[in-house]
Amino acid sequence: MQSRNFEFLRAEWPELASLAGFAEAYCFNDPASANIKLRTYCETLVGGLHSRLRLPKPIPVSLMELLRNESFIAITPRVVIDKLHAIRIHGNKAAHGEKPSSQTSLWLIREAFDIGRWLCATYSSQAVENLEFVTPQAPSQPKADYKREKKALLEQHAKQEVLMQKLLAQLEEERARVEQLEVRTNEIEELRQTANVRGLQSATTLQFDEATTRKQLIDIQLASAGWQILTQGEAIKQDRLSFVTVEEEIHEQPTPSGVGYADYVLWDEGLPIAVIEAKKTSVDAEKGRHQAKHYADGLETKYGQRPIIFYTNGHDIWIWDDNEIAGYPPRKLYAFYSKDSLQRLLFQHKNRRKLSEVSSKPEILGERIYQHEALRQICERFQGKHRKALAVQATGTGKTRLSIAVCDVLTQANWVKRVLFLCDRRELRKQAKNAFSSFLELPVSVLSSKSVTDDANRVFVATYPAMQRIYENFDPGFFDLIIADESHRSIYNVHGDIFRYFDALQLGLTATPIEMISRSTCGLFGCDFKNPTTNYPLDLAVEEKYLVPYQVVKHTTKFLRDGINGQSLTADQILEIEDQGIDPNTLEFSSSQIDQAIFNKDTNRKILQNLMDHGIRQADQQTLGKSIVFARNHNHAKLLEQLFNELYPQYSGRFCQVIDTYDPRAEQLIDDFKGEGSNDQLTLAISVDMLDTGIDVPEIVNLIFAKPVKSPVKFWQMVGRGTRLCENLFGPGKNKTHFQIFDHWGVVEYHGLKDQAVTVPKSKTLFERLFLERIKLAQTSLKFADPDFFENIALWLFDAIKALNEDSIAVKDKWKIKQQLADLDLLRQFSGNTVSLLENEKAPLMQWVDIRGSADAYQWDLIITKLQIEKF
């Protein structure tokens, strides 16, 4: 894409010249796209310098983090960094839906031009001192001609866009091939003495106007927060009560004249609500703190209202809420407060109560003492002027309810107006919304980009990915409390910007045991390493009978656990592998090749058969209880589903289903699994990540690890799916007492869980026991010479045998015996051999009869059959 002002970059940085050319082409017709292109221009430039100079890259790699990188700051003049930030801010806003003006785009193009000149002057031998910027002009031709030309240009731009994307992709591949070597401290210092000197000299030679850039940055950020900069006269003329003045004269200052001039004062209803002191970008913003305080003192003396203090150097922004009762020490921000947020902050100064004076609604926490203790500890931490807290509670002990109780107390005490609840999936968002709506009278809403102007709702629920896309649309004071569900390392690495951006009280919730919580997670929520605000572990919850314990049903091999080499196989291992249909002579297995074992059909059949034979059953004593199989990926899950339907066709494909992100009906399937949807038969869910965390189904009694799990965070979340209490699960007064973990990959041992392994005896199912009792009844009727009664029982046995599904693998394996006993005349003879076949071969197959919906009737039949035997 040819450019008007950036062709000097074409020789060494063609991608930058093209990106800037697109911005020039779009600035009048599509300013938002122009700003997005300029942001990509900055991202490409900054990323290129990191690769070229082998600077260490931060994690996560984002433009914001690259610009904050200490080694990059060391070699780049502050005025250039400010220009880069200006483009970044506007590019982000354009990407998130804000509609900028052409004037803004033109200014940013000029900033990009200056950055490009600095790049050439510093890192090439090209002379750029005399280059002059030519302002792009708006189209002036007649409307019809303009439309035709615009259409042609759009078509041309579309083709060039494709080429541009290919160029950027090639550039990224080239960078990836460059080994990323960390620059040591002495090397950074050397870069500081060379590149930084050259960079500063270039900025000086090119006569960059630092003061103008700094003012533009501050003005941009104020405008983004909804403020308009006016003089007092302009404000009066426009009849505006909320505005910003610059160089505001303030008396009673520690100066020889007793007068000072505040850089910015923010006004509302004729009263000052904030004052901003701006320092040079080369000066630490902290140096403006005391000067801003003097301005706040003078404004308070004159107007009777103390404004909130901000101080900045155009890049770093600090807020100092120095109210004696409700204030906090200075803290860093990434944007300015809006008028609404400042009004709310001043309201809290006047109306905030002590948290110890307020109690949450009794029904939220019930009578669980540990919950009330956790609430007390969190409130004490907030009351002690800490702004962050971390609650560690085993899954199923009520983290969401605890967070609701915290919201209830903070809102009653006028600490909080708006709450943001963050979770990692839409299903958890739905659960949280329902929970908050059930216990609080506050309006609850799912967060969207439109929530920026939402003054009706008080609690907003969102997923981390959704919030990550739009968080910069809000001002940093929009929320008063942020609750982070499942706060673990990935939150810090992937979504940490959300928590750094918002200036709110923050409460992290996690079920990960404190021994496994990362240092970064503790730091994110202001706690010392392994010392959270409150902790309620799994062992204690089980001991106090708020959760049920697990039992481990081991069914694994060293091969499946670790991966092994062919030459290390023992004779027993060879037999195991051959039983699975694998040729040991072809093996060269290691843990990285584990998929070969995972996708072995015989292995997966045994996993399913082990579950169906030994899993905890429902109250009917026949049907498998609610169970989750944790599969490795979508293909593995579909294989398990296919094999289950082959093994147990009597369930007609509705009993076992895959729940993962590949299925657009995933949320509906989760409702089915909970018993709240249209398919109440769904009992065995094969999950790929979607049921690992947060899903609340107390009826779950079997968890099957059909894959290795190395993440301790994920493992503990998975275990938590089975720990919840469930009253009357097996009938009146028959509560859930434990759940089973089927460990096929040594996962329990790997994670150091207490090995509460059990050998589960194969119990007889309801219909199997009924079948055996009917055999006894037939024998008894013959013994007492009642041929008519015997005939009825023989017909019942005959019908039960015929009803067995011949597509079932278990029935197919016994097809000869089924065919033999399907002869009614043979049954009527009821010889000793026939009885033996019925008891030992046919009765075990009765466990696969689907009796759902008829269990009570068969239970009654069993009782009557036993009574009939006694009656004879």
Image (cartoon, rainbow, N blue to C red):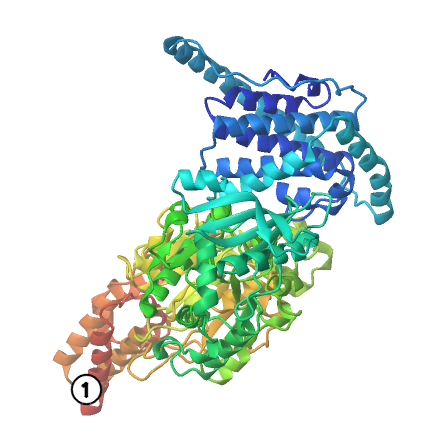
Seen from the viewer's position, the closer of residues 347 and 43 is 347
Residue 600 visible in the shown view = no
Q: Is residue 388 visible?
A: yes
Identified at 66% across, 64% down, the residue is 519
In the figure, is residue 187 to the left or right of 703? right
Residue 80 occupies which quadrant of the picture?
A: top right
In the structure shown, which secondary structural element does the residue marked by tag 1 occupy? helix
Residue 609 on image: x %, y %: 44, 64
- In this picture, residue 57 sits left or right of residue 778: right
**Which image quarter: residue 388?**
bottom right
Q: Is residue 233 above or below residue 831?
A: above
The residue that mark 1 highlights is 868
Q: Nearer the viewer, residue 701 or 16?
A: 16
**Label 1 CA crowd tier, 10 Å (few <14, some 14–19, many 20+):** some
Nearest to the observer: residue 609 or residue 677: 677
In which quadrant is the N terminus drawn?
top right
- From this viewpoint, which residue is outermost toward the front? 257
Q: Nearer the viewer, residue 838 or 125?
A: 125
Q: Residue furthest left?
A: 788
Q: Residue at x 25, y 73 (%)?
A: 855
Rendered position, 857 above or below 864: above
Identify the residue shown where x is 63% and y is 73%: 531
The x, y position of residue 799, in whole percent, is 21, 67
- Quadrant the C terminus occupies: bottom left
Where residue 77 sits in the image (x, y, percent)? 74, 37
Query: As shown in the figure, which amino acid type bears the numbered disc 1?
Result: Gln
x, y (%) of residue 702? 44, 69
User: Total number of numbered labels?
Assistant: 1
| Residue 237 placement, left or right of 86 | left
Q: Quadrant of residue 746?
A: bottom right
